[in-house]
Image (cartoon, coloured by chain):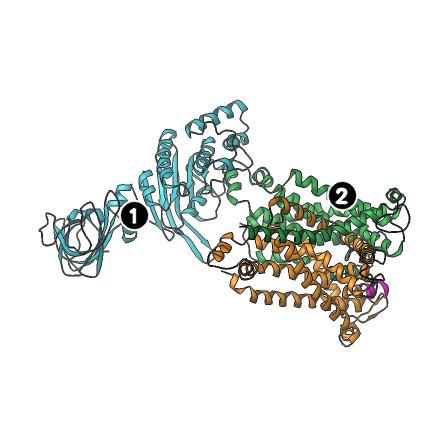
Amino acid sequence: MALVELQNIRLSYGNVEVLKGVSLRLESAEFAAVLGPSGCGKTSLLRIIAGFSEYTGTLRIDGQDVANLPPHRRNIGIVFQDYALFPHQTVEGNIGYGLRLRSLPRSEIRDRVGALLDLLKLNGFAARYPEHLSGGQRQRVAIARALAIEPKMLLLDEPLSALDKKLREEMQVELRQIQKTVGITTLFVTHDQEEALALADSVIVMTEGTIRQVGSPAEIYMRPADAFVAEFIGQSNLFNAVVTQMRGNDVLARLDSGESIVLKSDAPINPRSPIVFSVRPERLRIGKHGESASLENALDGKIQHVIFMGSHSQVRVATAGNRSIKVQTSDCCREGDDVTLSWNSWDTVILSSGMS
Amino acid sequence: MSVRKTQHLGMRAIGGALILVLVVPIVVLIGVSLNSGVEQVFPPRGLSLRWYENLANRSGFVEAARLTLMLAVGSALVSVLVSLCASVALTRFRFVGHDVVLTLLLSPLIVPQVVVGMGFLVTLAGLGIFNSFISLALLHCVITLPFTVRVVLSAMSGVPNSLEQAAQSLGATPLRAFFQITIPQIAPGLAAGGIFAFVTSFENFTASQFLVWDRTTLPVAIYTSVQTENDPTATALSSLIVLAVVLFIAIFNRFVAKHMFSGG
Amino acid sequence: MHNKKLLVAALLLPGAAIIAVFIAMMASMVRYSFSPGGVSVIGEGFTFDNYWKFLSSWFYWSYLFGSLRISLYCTFISAVIGYSIAYAMYRSGPRTQLIFGAILIIQLFTAYVIRTYAIMLLIGKNGIINKTLLGLNIIQQPMRLLFTETGVAIGLVMVSIPFMVFPILASLKNISPNVEMASASLGATPMRIFWTVTFSLSLPGVAAGVVIVYLFELTSYIVPGLLGGGYADMIANFIYNKAMRSFDYTFASAAAVITLVLSGIVVLSLNKLFDRLTRHERA
């Protein structure tokens, strides 16, 4: 049975529709990420699950409709974007707050808080006040405080956005480990797609109040459902083409600039249908101009600029049809070179086709 | 850069001189109150505390002091509580007319004291209510409210909603979250608001003087005394009040927010 | 979610009640200003008599103009003095700021009556000012300061200074130090930096102070009352006398309403003026 079930959730602020009929299921012990740009409604979704927002539709937690269940009875742990630590209480006081509310015996509170201090590597900080903690430490305290009440699930609102890169990467690993250790259903909200792909079992891509795709990180990345997902997740190059004929799983098509290409598709597509497909920058090979490529598809072009990133370079290639193709490669090339791009048919994803 | 240094020194000297100008009247006041004779001169001729002792005999002043203190404490309490309720409504809920409500709550500020007093007088006289205590109580609540609203609202705005929500998510009822989490955060604001209200009520004269029928307040009593009497008793009373203020500020400075008095 | 609406209403109720009382008092005063009246009488009916009486006589206008005039130059003087003090504080270390600040706050917390009384003792015939000037032989006879407009002016200025200093200081503190440094690096002398950068950027604070002080001085009662002794009455004294001495409630109400309207006009005009002056300050 799913732990959290949302059915057709809608939310409006005045005239603005923030959530336009969102339906979702979260399984027990799942680590899910809601990914989307600012304003897509992801934080509103979180607040609805937590109980801090009105909504229309059905929200079931543990099988129970929670429309009339106030936040303080939902037993859901929340880590806020600003951590929301109580400034007038110590780390120990913060973590133990929920336990004190439940009138647990002092010794038990002490034990539980101690265990969490261990888990979150906060040993030695018990008596500190939040103002004397670093960002990373505050975040751990926020997580510990939420876990202390042994909640049904954990909600995190942009948990890592305030941390610098190195700290963020460390915390990503730790967060994952903690979630696995404790085995708690976790939903976190982020605009950072790298974070979502790195942490989550299941990624829910949202924009403008609707869910565009739900899937594992690999699925989302390799098989984006539409142009938005393709562009939002990673980089992609979008092409327009018209299908000339189908041969089994192969789709023969012609680019809008005339070149013939081969794509793959599971479902049949009518000839003469217009399609949009996407190729990831790292799937494109740059070869010398005219050199016949070992890959199925080829496109001529000229290097516009090269940005050296250390482990690879980001290259922009101008091709016919006024395109500026993004390529990620470790091959060396210089601006102004004439080159041929090539890629395999199975490295393309058809995003929309002429069939309904 | 020595040029800047001397410039600053010059600035500070001017500023210091000007500040001194403000201090001189107070010094003179205290000095005059220590006169052993009836004449109100400075420097005092002979030093004596007799005018301070005389205060105990002046039942008029004693009564006025009692009323003024009651009004000040009462209106401070009422103002702070009312402001607290209003601030919760204004910061934790969205509703139509938010700005209008705020403007209305602050509206007594923009009306000149003499007009406020006039309004109260004319209305109460028209209604035949000639009870000073009730009239003054109402007046002082009205006058102190905008000050406390400003302070308390500002304090509450500084506490993010997420704190209360975090407490609720951990199991605290909304009421409990408010008292255990928000109130401690705004406590300094509540205290400051209370102090401002107290001072505003205590020293209020221009509006209050319209309503002193059967009872009078201390500022009004002092004013009347200054105009009609000829001994330094009023200066003694005034000096006591000044000393109380100085003491309060000194203690406050010591134990509490220093930055409050560094001119901000 | 009617629950929430009920809660909001309940929370706003006490504040609303107090403000309602206030507005009721003001409204009924306006009502009475339109009533025919006389001594101790508030008659039935509606009439513009009271307003006509006030607005058609130079004698009454002179109170308004007198108050506007005195407040004008007194506000100007307080602004100059207040700015100097604020600037001195701004350029001083925390210790000095603390002391100056404490002195100013003590002034604020001490009732106007008391402060004005103290000034009375200062400027009287036997006051310390006259004594010092006589002693230094600057004057041969004691100056008459008390019970003159000059005395009132001195009082208004001294009482207003704390109200000037704080807003100005706040806006001075808001100026990023980098701005002054940038100006200096571009070759500006300290004097120029002050006028073109510091002063300009602190103008919003000056504006705030001026509005507060002007309004306060315009409708001041205690200072003209004690230091003017009846010889330099301002509009507030006039209203009080009409109400409490002559018991001409309706006429006094009309005068009060006129004063209120005047105050409104003054505040709006000053705000507009300063808005225009500080237009470049706003992002």
Q: Is residue B43 visible?
A: yes
Disc 2: which residue: B244
The image quarter in which residue B96 lies: bottom right
Find residue A233 and name its label: 1
Helix, strand or loop for the magenta stretch, by majority: helix
Q: Chain of mark 2?
A: B
Looking at the rendered structure, the kind of residue marked 1 is Ile
Which of the pair A197/C281 is nearer the observer?
C281
Q: Position of residue A341 (x, y in %)?
A: 15, 52
Q: Is residue B105 visible?
A: no
Q: Color of chain B here?
A: green
- Marks 2 and 1: in contact by CB < 8 Å? no
Establish if B137 lies above or below A31: below
Which of the pair C17/C115 is nearer the observer?
C115
First to last magenta residue range: C240-245
Which chain is in cyan here? Answer: A
Q: Position of residue B146 (x, y in %)?
A: 66, 53
Which secondary structure lies at badge 1?
Answer: loop
Q: Position of residue B102 (x, y in %)?
A: 61, 55
**Direction bottom: furthest residue:** C56
Which chain is in orange here? Answer: C
Find residue B212 and name its label: none
Q: CA distance from mark 1 to mark 2?
A: 68 Å
Looking at the rendered structure, the kind of residue marked 2 is Ala
Task: From the viewer's perspective, tell me whether residue C11 is left or right of residue A65.
Answer: right
Task: From the viewer's perspective, tell me whether residue A259 is left or right of residue C133.
Answer: left
Please tell me whether residue B20 belongs to the stretch shown in magenta.
Answer: no
